[in-house]
Amino acid sequence: MKKTSISQSVAHLIEPTLKESDIELVDVEYKKTGKVWTLRVFIDKNQGVTVYDCQKLSQEIEDLIEIHGLVDVHYVLEVSSPGLDRPLKKEADFLRNKGKQIKIKTYSPIKNKKENTGTIIDFSNDTLFLADKKDVLKILLTDIAKANLIIEF
């Protein structure tokens, strides 16, 4: 199995287990840092993620991966919350954060800029509607390289 597809395979494998616990799968990363492979699973839930959630799911995920033989090299598994500045990747992420400020990077320039900030107005038909200081930008999900909440304290 290719290393690049392990993230997707793990995501498909663990999603039913997470849904049973009312936990959302935010992201899965499988990367090599130095000589060590790391599998990171980011989870979230309405009441917030606890250390107990991470411990419990870590064991369940490790068991599922072993049973299905998805990873054939030594790896480190990390299960955690995505944090306050979590990436926004799916329609549900954008809709959940309507009215909030985000920073967005696009693959191609929009109004001569690849980085924009603004307020999420809506998301529909795979399109983000983002209000900046002057206009409402319409950005296709496939054009978004990275999007994160802007945290204000």
Image (cartoon, rainbow, N blue to C red):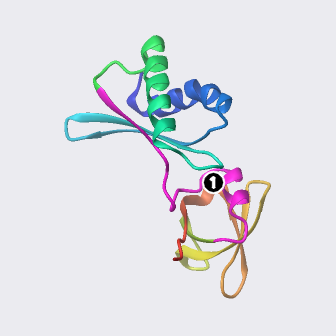
User: What residue sits 50% from the left and 30% below the top?
Assistant: 57
Q: Position of residue 115 (x, y in %)?
A: 52, 73
Residue with the most extreme right position: 125
Residue with the most extreme bottom position: 134
- Look at the image and tell me whether residue 150 can be seen: yes
Q: Nearer the viewer, residue 152 or 114?
A: 152
Where on the picture, by quarter, is residue 33?
Answer: top left
User: What residue sits 72% from the left and 71% below the top?
Assistant: 99
Q: Position of residue 17 (x, y in %)?
A: 61, 26
Q: Nearer the viewer, residue 79 or 147?
A: 79
SS at badge 1: helix
Residue located beneath label 1 in the image = 142
Where on the picture, by quarter, is residue 1?
Answer: top left
Q: Amino acid at mark 1?
A: Thr
How many neighbours does mark 1 have within 10 angstroms: few (below 14), some (14-19), or many (20 or more)?
few
Q: Position of residue 20 (x, y in %)?
A: 67, 28
